[in-house]
Image (spheres, rainbow, N blue to C red):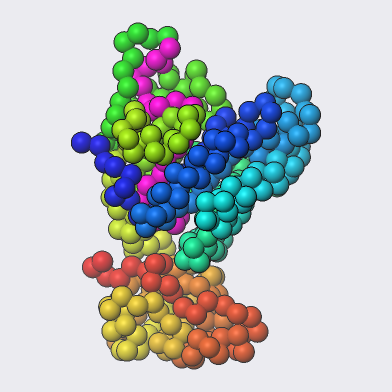
């Protein structure tokens, strides 16, 4: 049994360049039909994020750059020009369908390094809370070879796991994964469901990838590994025709990848098990009760700060007797944490001279013992 899109809550939709951009520029009619599909999804109460490629493809057309491989600085220049046009098309189209778009440009570091990861995560979740649709791309104008994803498949998977999305949809020019290249191998069959990304599945992607455009099946399988391990299900579907999301809902052929856990559990496991703690916060009994009731840790509940940690580091949360209550990613450097410990969140700006977060550790960035 394959799942249906309707049962997911937070959905990242990744759109490949070839769907959005053709020789004459943006495929406006297609984009408009997609936005209509997105409006239907949003009306169902589901949250949406877009990861949109197309900046370089669009920019090179606007600048009249020749076909063929671009030098790095040429693709960066193309991205600079193309991203403006791309963002404008998204903002205008989404607006016509009742959405507010918010542009987010990320680099590899923003999704890999914890400190910046916290920032990107809270900006994106705040956009969602405010009812805006994040439209995300790689910050291609500053990302050099060493620090760039280069493909939005993996970027989209990282974004999806970073914000605990439960579904990632990759809209591309192929309707899913095949056992072999479908154009050259008559025995190739389509896989509607991949319960787990095994070595065998990876091998299929290797051979099937060769006939595809940039991005290819290999990066899609890489994306599936990242996503499913962190609790995000994934779907590869053909997006070329009008109303691609409606078509999926109507049962058009695609490949589903099953999530191996759920996003909240995966994140808690990561926080509790896989990160080294750099310090500790001793909290009072009231704070322990609040945490057990599902609340965030506020500065007011912190009695003592131990260790030298930076914002985004993992710290232990200890009860007054010194027993570990849980762990979390702290929103302040140790020095600042000490200055606001025991104080009301409203005082933070006066004490520190800048408006920091109201929580010392946000609920989403915390795993209590036994959770
Ligand atoms: N970030 C690139 C762009 O907007 C696209 C990368 C990809 O196609 O996966 O042009």
Q: Quadrant of the N terminus?
A: top left
Closest to the observer: 112 or 123?
123
Horizontal arrangement in the rendering, residue 343 relative to residue 139 (left or right): left
Q: Which residue does the image show at 33% across and 50% down from the upper left?
A: 8
Task: State whether residue 249 is above or below residue 292.
Answer: above
Q: Which residue does the image show at 70% across and 40% down from the upper left?
A: 82
Report x, y in % for residue 144. Answer: 68, 42
Horizontal arrangement in the rendering, residue 213 relative to residue 224 (left or right): right
Report x, y in % for residue 104. Answer: 59, 54
Report x, y in % for residue 301. Answer: 40, 87
Horizontal arrangement in the rendering, residue 235 relative to residue 14 (left or right): left
Q: Is residue 239 magenta?
A: no
Report x, y in % for residue 164. Answer: 40, 56
Task: State whether residue 276 is above or below residue 56.
Answer: below
Q: Residue furthest front?
A: 96
Q: Which residue does the image show at 42% across and 77% down from the upper left?
A: 280
Task: State whether residue 33 is above or below residue 179.
Answer: below
Q: Which residue does the image show at 37% across and 47% down from the upper left?
A: 167
Task: State whether residue 97 is above or below residue 177.
Answer: below
Q: Is residue 168 magenta?
A: yes
Q: Residue furthest left?
A: 1
Closest to the observer: 314 or 295?
295
**Figure label count:** 0
Q: Which residues are magenta?
A: 160-183
Horizontal arrangement in the rendering, residue 1 relative to residue 121 (left or right): left
Residue 336 in sight here: yes
Q: Quadrant of the C terminus?
A: bottom left
Residue 308 in sight here: no
């Amino acid at each position: 049994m394959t799942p249906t899109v309707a049962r997911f809550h937070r959905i990242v939709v990744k759109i490949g360049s070839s769907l959005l951009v053709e020789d004459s520029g943006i495929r406006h009619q297609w984009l408009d039909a997609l936005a209509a599909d997105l409006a239907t999804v949003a009306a169902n109460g589901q949250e949406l994020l877009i990861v949109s490629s197309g900046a370089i493809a669009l920019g090179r057309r606007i600048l009249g750059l020749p076909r063929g491989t671009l030098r790095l600085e040429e693709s960066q220049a193309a991205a600079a020009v193309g991203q403006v046009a791309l963002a404008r098309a998204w903002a205008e189209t989404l607006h016509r369908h009742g959405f507010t778009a918010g542009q987010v440009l990320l680099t590899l570091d923003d999704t890999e390094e914890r400190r910046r990861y916290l920032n990107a995560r809270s900006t994106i979740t705040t956009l969602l809370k405010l009812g805006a649709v994040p439209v995300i791309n790689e910050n291609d104008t500053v990302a050099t070879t060493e620090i760039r994803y280069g493909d939005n498949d993996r970027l989209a998977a990282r974004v999806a796991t970073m914000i605990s999305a439960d579904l990632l949809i990759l809209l591309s020019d192929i309707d899913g994964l095949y056992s072999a290249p479908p154009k050259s191998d008559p025995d190739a069959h389509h896989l509607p469901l991949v319960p787990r990304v095994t070595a065998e599945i990876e091998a299929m992607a290797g051979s099937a990838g060769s006939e595809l455009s940039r991005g290819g099946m290999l990066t899609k399988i890489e994306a599936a590994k990242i996503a499913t391990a962190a609790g995000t299900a994934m779907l590869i579907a053909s997006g070329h025709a009008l109303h691609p999301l409606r078509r999926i809902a109507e049962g058009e052929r695609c490949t589903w990848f099953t999530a191996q856990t759920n996003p909240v559990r995966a994140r808690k496991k990561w926080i509790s098990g896989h990160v080294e703690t750099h310090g500790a916060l001793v909290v009072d009994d009231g704070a322990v009760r609040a945490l057990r009731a599902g609340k965030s840790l506020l500065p007011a509940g912190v009695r003592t700060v131990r260790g030298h940690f930076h914002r985004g580091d993992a710290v232990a949360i200890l009860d007054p007797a010194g027993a570990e209550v849980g762990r979390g990613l702290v929103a302040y450097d140790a020095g600042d944490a000490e200055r606001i410990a025991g104080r009301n969140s409203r005082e933070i700006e006066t004490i520190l001279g800048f408006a920091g977060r109201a929580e010392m550790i946000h609920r989403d960035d915390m795993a209590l013992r036994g959770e």
